[in-house]
Amino acid sequence: MRQRQTGTVTDPGDRQLVRERTLDAVRSAISDGQLVPGSRLTERQLCETYAISRTLAREVVRQLESERLIDVVAHRGLRIAQLTRQRVREIYAVRTELEVLVVRSYVEAATPEDIDRLCAIYADLRAAGDAHELDRIVREVTRLLWHMIDVANAQVAGDILKQLVARVNMLRFMSMNMPGQIALSMVQIEQTVDRIAARDARGAEAAIRVYVEEAGRSAIRYFDAQGATDRPS
């Protein structure tokens, strides 16, 4: 695991900040493959890597378990959750319908200034795509989604997507490792943004559905190419 020290907590007021920062760091390590699915994770490892207390480490573990990013395996302790083809299919099926809902609500709620902001975020995303910088692509596409969720006030969809975000980002890395997928995704996201800017709700819904479903197929192809199976973790 890459060392991402957060510093020792000395002020109780900093406790929540350190907890969230540590959670974000571990989620990122899982998403980008630093923490390999199936590998062991311990509270001591978290304490040493992120310079946090054992109490905070336990809180982080409980949150990661609630997000299904780690599994408690009998007689083996904590393991980074492993994806199966069935889990991948389910995640993309749920993600598709949630993002369609978010896009529909965004078109209804967005002001011209909101759409300008959306286009600006997409420009940053496109620059990351042109540079083939996977970490930056994942960060910008997530920022794009959070912007739409906030403007759409899609609280329920947003809550569910936030529970899925680390697993979705893990799958994004998988999907974008397939040849040509980055360029295709950029085109499909641009089509979605264009339809939103035109206030074409149906067109935007159709475009986001095509984008997410194709990303899902790409993730499955990558998954299969690694010789993965449907065995549970």
Image (cartoon, rainbow, N blue to C red):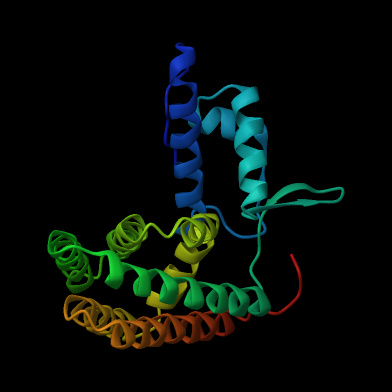
Kindly tell me whether residue 33 is visible in this rendering.
Answer: no
Q: How many marks?
A: 0
* Depth order, front residue of 97/92: 97
Residue 60 percent coordinates (x, y): 60, 37
Residue located 40% across and 69% down the image: 102
- Give the left or right position of residue 127, taking residue 8 as reference: left
Residue located 48% across and 77% down the image: 96
Residue located 45% across and 43% down the image: 24
Residue 121, by quadrant, is bottom left
The C terminus, quarter of image: bottom right
Residue 156 percent coordinates (x, y): 51, 58
Q: Is residue 160 above or below residue 76?
A: below
* Depth order, front residue of 62/175: 62
Kindly tell me whether residue 15 is visible in this rendering.
Answer: yes
As drawn, the residue found furthest toward the front would be 108
* Depth order, front residue of 230/207: 207
Q: Is residue 6 above or below residue 172?
A: above
Residue 86 percent coordinates (x, y): 67, 79
Q: Is residue 48 above or below residue 213?
A: above
Q: Is residue 178 above or below residue 114?
A: below
Residue 107, by quadrant, is bottom left
As drawn, the residue found furthest toward the right would be 75
Residue 82, by quadrant, is bottom right
Residue 70 percent coordinates (x, y): 66, 52
